[in-house]
Amino acid sequence: MDANHQLNFLQERIEEIGSAIFYNLSEAVLKLPTSIVSTLKTDEYGFVWFFVQKPTQRLTEFEQEFPVKLDFYKKGKGYFLQVTGKGFVVTDPEEMNALVDLPEEKKKLANSKYALVKVKIQKAEYYETASSTKASWWQQTWSTIATWFRHHPYRTGNTYYPAS
C-alpha cells in the first residue's frame, strides 16, 4: 500500500471513530493535559486537527511543538488506532482560516475557550479486534484458548508510516 492509500485508509478510520484520547508526551513542566478530543478533520498532508481545552496559563508559555500519542477507539467498531506524531499549537489566524469547512462560530471558540492543535501523523498502528469477524464455534474456542497464552487478543495489526 503506497503512502497515499495509507493516508486515505487512516483518514477514513479516524473519521469513522471521530474521537481520541490525546496524550502530550513532552517532558515539559507546562504541557497540554491528557484529554478526550473530537477530530475536526484529517487533511491531505497527514495532519489530524482538533480542539483542546485552553489552559488557565497563557498559551504562549507552553511548548508550541511536542510529541503526541492519540488513541482512537469506539465501542463496537471492531478496530482501533494508535497514532504517534508531532503536535503543534495553532495560533496563526491564517492557518486557522485554512480550515475553510469549519463554521465561523467554531473558529471563534479557538480564540476564547479552546486551543487548536494539529498532529502530523508519523506512525499509526491499526488493530482489528477478535470480535470484528464471524468465526465458527471451533475458531472461537481455539481463539479463546490461544488468548490465554498471548498478551493481546487482537487478530491482526498493521503499522503505517504515511509521513514520508
Image: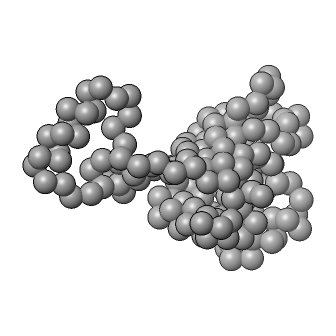
The percent coordinates of residue 95 (x first, y second) are 85, 65
139 vs 39: above or below: above
For the C terminus, give its image quadrant: bottom right
Q: Residue at x 13, y 54 (%)?
A: 136
| Residue 53 visible here | no
The percent coordinates of residue 41 (x first, y second) are 64, 65
The outermost residue toward the bottom is 101
Task: State which quadrant residue 55 falls in.
Answer: top right
The percent coordinates of residue 118 (x first, y second) are 74, 54
The percent coordinates of residue 26 (x first, y second) are 76, 30
Q: Residue at x 38, y 34 (%)?
A: 152
Labels in figure, total = 0
The outermost residue toward the left is 137
Whether residue 15 sits left or right of residue 46 in the image: it is left
Query: Closest to the observer: 55 or 68?
Result: 68
Task: State which quadrant residue 9 falls in.
Answer: bottom right
Q: Residue at x 47, y 48 (%)?
A: 157
